[in-house]
Amino acid sequence: MQTHDELVEAVFNNPSYRSEVLCIIKLRATLESALEELSEPAKPEKPIRRMLRYDDLIGKSPIIQFADSPEINRCRHGITLLYSALAKGIMHTHSLSTQQANKVLLDVVTRYTNR
């Protein structure tokens, strides 16, 4: 049985996983930039003062923006698909549980991101 660090190193150096990990990193960077653009609301010249409506509370108001852009949805969907495929591959290749494979994959993505 390999230790966690040895597994991370083995997956990190495996060329068959490298392109998928790089795609996850690129999608994460795109997602973070899209979320930053959404989090910077335009400031109105005059503050709007009005009563709070029911639509404001349940999130269907144009004031509260919960809806994601298509780019954000595309990035999240791509990250989810790639991450689950990589986790399943690591689980079967190294005979790990789901939790162990997720932890190894998270450490591999973190290591690639910091390079």
Image (cartoon, rainbow, N blue to C red):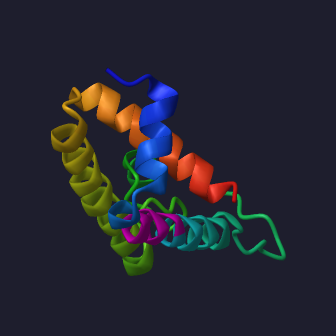
Q: Residue at x 78, y 71 (%)?
A: 43
Is 27 located above or below residue 94 in the figure? below
Q: Which of the image's four quarters has the N terminus?
A: top left
Q: Pick the residue in front: 14 or 61.
A: 14
Q: Quadrant of residue 79?
A: bottom left
Residue 80 visible in this rendered orientation of the protein? yes
Q: Which of the image's four quarters has the C terminus?
A: bottom right
Q: Pick the residue in front: 73 or 102.
A: 102
Residue 52 visible in this rendered orientation of the protein? no
Q: Residue at x 30, y 62 (%)?
A: 82
Asked whether residue 65 is drawn in magenta, I would say: no
Q: Residue at x 69, y 69 (%)?
A: 41
Q: Residue furthest right?
A: 45
Asked whether residue 20 is drawn in magenta, I would say: yes
What's the magenta region? 18-25
Q: Residue at x 65, y 63 (%)?
A: 39
In the drawing, does residue 16 fall left or right of residue 114?
left
Q: Pick the residue in front: 46 or 21.
A: 21
Main SS of the magenta part reads helix
Q: Pick the residue in front: 31 or 70.
A: 31
In the drawing, does residue 34 fall left or right of residue 93?
right
Is 107 located above or below residue 81 in the figure? above
Q: Quadrant of residue 98?
A: top left
Expressed as whole percent of the image width and height from the top left, the position of residue 27 reads: 47, 70
Expressed as whole percent of the image width and height from the top left, the position of residue 95 reads: 19, 31
In the drawing, does residue 64 fall left or right of residue 75?
right
Q: Residue furthest left?
A: 92
